[in-house]
Image (cartoon, helix red, strand yellow):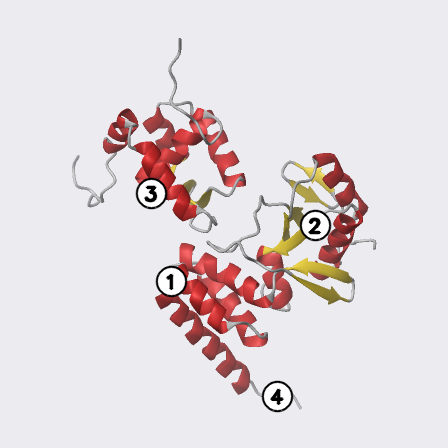
Amino acid sequence: MKLSGRSSLAAVAAAVAAGLREHGIQAVLTGGACASLYSAGAYHSRDLDFVVIGGVSQSRMDSAMAMAGFVRRGDRYVHPRARFYVEFPRGPLAIGGDHRVRPVVRITAYGRIRMLSATDSCRDRLAAFYHWGDRQSLSVAAWIASRHRVGMATLRRWSEAEGAADRFREFVMEKRQIRRRSRRRPRVP
Amino acid sequence: MVIKSSSPFGSGTRTRVLLSLSLLGESYARELARVLRAPLSGVQKALRSLELDGLVAGRPVGRTRVFQLDPRYFARDALKVFLQRLAEPETVLRSQVATLRRRPRRTGKPL
């Protein structure tokens, strides 16, 4: 797939995922890009963070990324036309103190993307809220939880383990507010 | 013979930066360089590599990047315990850290 300046995040993610798969590299899309895909554009991210499962040499990674048209610039991969860049943060794949993360495969119009589940993407955003007080991440997490089926019991247990039981209650309230707002919105005839 | 402390986190500077951050809670490159009496460039390099490894996280405060042990690191609890243990015999480092004034001071109050 040829990427252009107008390629969407999903198109870029699928192209990169295909290149990595072709080279036998197992990688999972995480972070803001994942949240952006679940939030259907309500949140924008320009960087795609893939966590590689297992080791991979730099040359193999370079050729896998070259398949999608990306070249390495320092720690990241950039594309001559696409607006997005790709990074490979060091693993393991973990969210807060939990490293038992089970990625899912999402089928898009552009191809398959191995990524965090909606519940884990929610946890990923909540981790930023819990540990950094980042309220934008709270909104995104609440947005994801209000539009996707997420394991609220899992989120609660994990939040307690992160020492953020009170902040989890704030998240639940935020989620309710988003639902209420979306119900109130008048329908266009 | 040169006697050095052990450096289980790679270079000595990386280990000492981590120890300092575990004692201070959070800090920035210039302060760490002052505490460790190490070149600023070496401390900045250590912080960059520790950040890449996910052990520390930095956030901008004004024009300064303030670092702390990454609270989202999956082994952060074990890391904290390990660093506390490693810091126990580091009497020099602990006394250097103790010279830093961290408590607030009202604006305009003379030193």
Quadrant assignment, res A115: bottom right
Residue type highlighted by circle 1? Ala
Residues at marks 1 and 4 on the same chain: yes
Dot label at residue A187? 4
Task: Work out whether mark 2 precedes mark 1 in sequence or the reverse, and give the earlier one.
Answer: 2
Task: Work out whether mark 1 precedes mark 4 in sequence or the reverse, and give the earlier one.
Answer: 1
Mark 4, Cα crowd under 10 Å, few <14 / some 14-19 / many 20+, is few
Residue type highlighted by circle 3? Gly
Residue type highlighted by circle 4? Arg
Q: Nearer the viewer, residue A180 or A27?
A: A27
In terms of secondary structure, where does tag 3 sit? Answer: loop
Dot label at residue B76? none
| Residue ID for mark 2 | A26
Q: Is residue A2 left or right of residue A94?
A: right
Measured in 3D between alpha carbons, the distance from the residue under mark 3 to the one under mark 2, in whole angstroms, is: 36 Å
Residue type highlighted by circle 2? Gln
| Residue located 55% across and 72% down the image | A150
| Residue ID for mark 3 | B25
Measured in 3D between alpha carbons, the distance from the residue under mark 4 to the one under mark 3, in whole angstroms, is: 51 Å
Residues at marks 2 and 4 on the same chain: yes
Quadrant assignment, res A7: bottom right
| Residue located 36% across and 60% down the image | A163
In terms of secondary structure, where does tag 4 sit? Answer: loop
Q: Nearer the viewer, residue A140 or B95?
A: B95
Closer to viewer: mark 4 or mark 3: 3
Residues at marks 3 and 1 on the same chain: no
Closer to viewer: mark 2 or mark 4: 2
| Residue located 36% across and 34% down the image | B19
